Image (spheres, grey):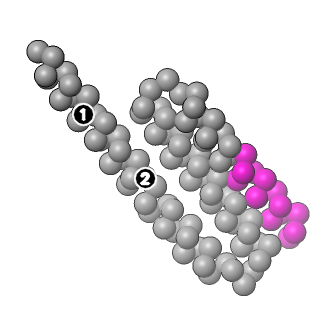
Amino acid sequence: MHLLGDILILTGSIFVFLGALGLIRMPDTFNRIQAGTKAVTLGAIGVFMGLAILFPDWASKLVVVMGFILLTSPVSSSAIARAFYRIEQNKARNKR
């Protein structure tokens, strides 16, 4: 079980790193939002699952945190994308 927990933490950390790299490397805002949201959410869940395996007495608290991340991350990225889209639409209308 210790090895499985370590593997999950390592995999989650790799996803978080790749999400951060995607924030830097992606060409536009919508791609950056997706890279940050998808990869970092999956990475955080992996890290928390690994911690729950390594420290079973923390499992209930970590499940609550994972649920919070799974509920808030897609909503916040959608709100940011929608706000950016509306800002771009207003800029295009003002140029006419």
Q: Nearer the viewer, residue 93 or 52?
A: 93
| Label 2 element class | helix
**Image quadrant assignment for residue 49:** bottom right
Determine whether 41 is above or below 64 in the image: above
**Image quadrant assignment for residue 64:** bottom right
Amino acid beneath label 2 = Pro
Q: Few, some or many C-alpha atoms within 10 Å of disc 1 (few <14, some 14-19, many ≥20)?
A: few
Amino acid beneath label 1 = Ile
Name of the residue lying farthest toward the bottom: 57
Q: Residue at x 13, y 22 (%)?
A: 94
Residue range highlighted in magenta: 1-14
Q: Residue at x 38, y 54 (%)?
A: 75
Magenta run includes residue 5: yes
Q: Residue at x 60, y 41 (%)?
A: 19
Residue 89 placement (x, y as % from top left)? 21, 28
Q: Is residue 56 left or right of residue 72?
A: right
Q: Residue at x 23, y 35 (%)?
A: 86
- Quadrant of the rendering where the C terminus is positioned: top left
* Residue that mark 1 sits on: 87
Q: Nearer the viewer, mark 1 or mark 2?
A: 1
Q: Are marks 1 and 2 in contact (CB under 8 Å)?
A: no
Mark before the other along the chain sequence, 1 or 2: 2
* Residue that mark 2 sits on: 74
Report the Cα–Cα distance between label 1 and label 2.
20 Å
| Label 1 element class | helix
Magenta run includes residue 24: no
> Which mark identifies residue 31?
none
